[in-house]
Amino acid sequence: MDLCFDLTLAVGYTSRAQRSRRLTEGWVGAHMFCPRCGNPNIRHYNNNEPVADFFCPRCNGCYELKSKSGRFNERVNDGAYATMIERITSNTNPDFLFLSYSAAAMCVTDLVIVPKHFFVPKIIEERPPLAPSARRAGWRGCNILLSGVPKQGRIAIIRSGTELPREQVIEKLHRSSNLAKGDVRTRTWLFDVLNCVNILPHDEFSLSEMYKYEKLLSTIHPDNHNIRAKIRQQLQILRDAGYIEFLGRGSYRRLSL
């Protein structure tokens, strides 16, 4: 995979944002495979397509591209807050591609896919409304909080200028589909418990260690009054999905990604 941009695509464009869009979208259209089915390429939708930026002609997978010079921060600007929440709750969200590039070398440095089922309302932050003097006064945008996505949902395709094996990317994405359980509220609970598992200091852990997050989880989910039972339930789902192993007698092992 050639990681460098085709600079001829930006000829005639003076806006930095337009040049970046032309180069990054051109690169994805020329070099990106479908992470869901392995098709060698994905295609660009017609301009102003409300669904996504790219689609796979084989499996109809949809992808939205976010690109940035340098690494992404915790918050990534997106479009209208209400539209984003509607997409998430209706399960019409595309998978997201987060592409980082070097402005000096004009090459891709990192590319990560976040599968659509990892998008839940708590990782979508509403921005303040635009000022009354603005052209779109009162409009509210949103930020995607990448830090709220479990690391199992941030699947690297290119890391530090090196392309990872395609089979590995596809396998990880397929494996993550085991977490696409129920509605948005159900997945929110699952990902909150998974984030707790991820921050445990050791791969082997006990149920009592998980209960230490009871107060944190009760703060996030104040309407639930049986947090420990919910923790046990989510651990069982994570076990069945292949992310942890039950060792018996209240002990578990966190499995490698």
Image (spheres, rainbow, N blue to C red):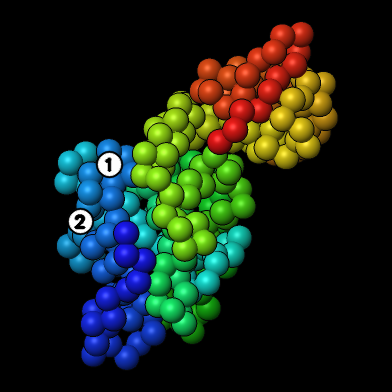
Quadrant assignment for the N terminus:
bottom left
Q: Position of residue 51 (x, y in %)?
A: 27, 53
Label annotation for residue 53? none
Give the camera-side residue of 113 and 202. Answer: 202
Q: Which residue is mark 2?
A: 43
Q: Residue 111: tell me if it is visible.
A: yes
Place residue 82 in its image quadrant.
bottom left
- Front: mark 1 or 2: 1
Side of 5 where 228 appears, left or right = right
Q: Residue 49: tell me if it is visible.
A: no
Q: Position of residue 3 (x, y in %)?
A: 36, 66
Eyeballing the image, is 65 above or below 38?
Answer: below
**What amino acid type is highlighted by mark number 2?**
Arg
Label annotation for residue 38? 1
**N-term mark: 1 or 2:** 1
Q: Position of residue 128 (x, y in %)?
A: 57, 67
Eyeballing the image, is 38 above or below 182?
Answer: below
Residue in view at x 57 percent, y 27 percent: 243
Side of 89 where 5 appears, left or right = left
**What amino acid type is highlighted by mark number 1?**
Gly
Place residue 106 in its image quadrant.
bottom left
Residue in view at x 53 percent, y 23 percent: 242
Q: Position of residue 136 (x, y in %)?
A: 41, 75
Place residue 221 in its image quadrant.
top right
Eyeballing the image, is 69 above or below 238?
Answer: below
Dot 1 crowding, Cα within 10 Å, few <14, some 14–19, many 20+:
some
Tag 2's secondary structure? strand
Real-space Cα separation, disc 1 to disc 2, in angstroms: 13 Å
Residue in view at x 54 percent, y 39 percent: 152
